[in-house]
Amino acid sequence: MSLNKEQVQELIQAARRVSGNSYSPYSGFKVGAALLGKSGRIYSGCNFENAAFGAGTCAERVALGAAVSAGEREFIALAVCGGDTPITPCGICRQALSEFGAMEVYCAALKGEETQKYSLLELLPQGFKLEV
Ligand code: THU
């Protein structure tokens, strides 16, 4: 299922809105992410950093945690935004998202029209899977 233009804009707007809450005093780099679940609900998250650098978390995994905590495990699309030009999810976030299957990924900057569209599989081919 592919999103129409309005749905893409709504998801990017949700990501941009939550980026305003980013706690990023060390990098100064605000990121927002929004996940559209199969239920139709949108879950958003921002990055938060820590004086012990490794204790910070990316916006995408914050949004994913919010979604999973609400009982959502299947996703249609992710939007992520940060910086002056479109950003793509980091490697750890790609792996974390891939646990929950295929989805579209819309990458944007904090402002502006430019949007890049990928599939998660395209961003993370051959991701790690554990047979349980
Ligand atoms: N960051 C994200 O939240 N998502 C990304 O996709 C890339 C990086 C955050 C982590 C850190 O707080 C800041 O951006 C700079 O790396």
Image (cartoon, rainbow, N blue to C red):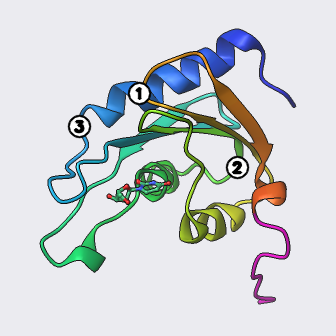
Q: Is residue 82 above or below residue 9?
A: below
SS under mark 2: loop
How far apart, in angstroms, are the residues tagged by discs 1 and 3?
Answer: 10 Å
How far apart, in angstroms, are the residues tagged by discs 2 and 3?
Answer: 25 Å
- Amino acid type indicated by mark 2: Glu
Q: Which residues are magenta?
A: 124-132
Give the residue number, with chain letter if any, for mark 2.
74
Taking the spot 78% from the left edge, 15% from the top edge, the residue there is 4
Q: Under 8 Å from ligand 1: the CB of mark 1?
A: no
Residue 84: image quadrant is: top left
Viewer-nearest residue: 72 or 56: 56
- Residue 111 placement, left or right of 39: left
Residue 125 is covered by the magenta coloring: yes
Which residue is situated farthest in the front direction here?
84
Give the residue number, with chain letter if any, for mark 1.
16
- Amino acid type indicated by mark 1: Arg
Q: Under 8 Å from ligand 1: the CB of mark 2?
A: no
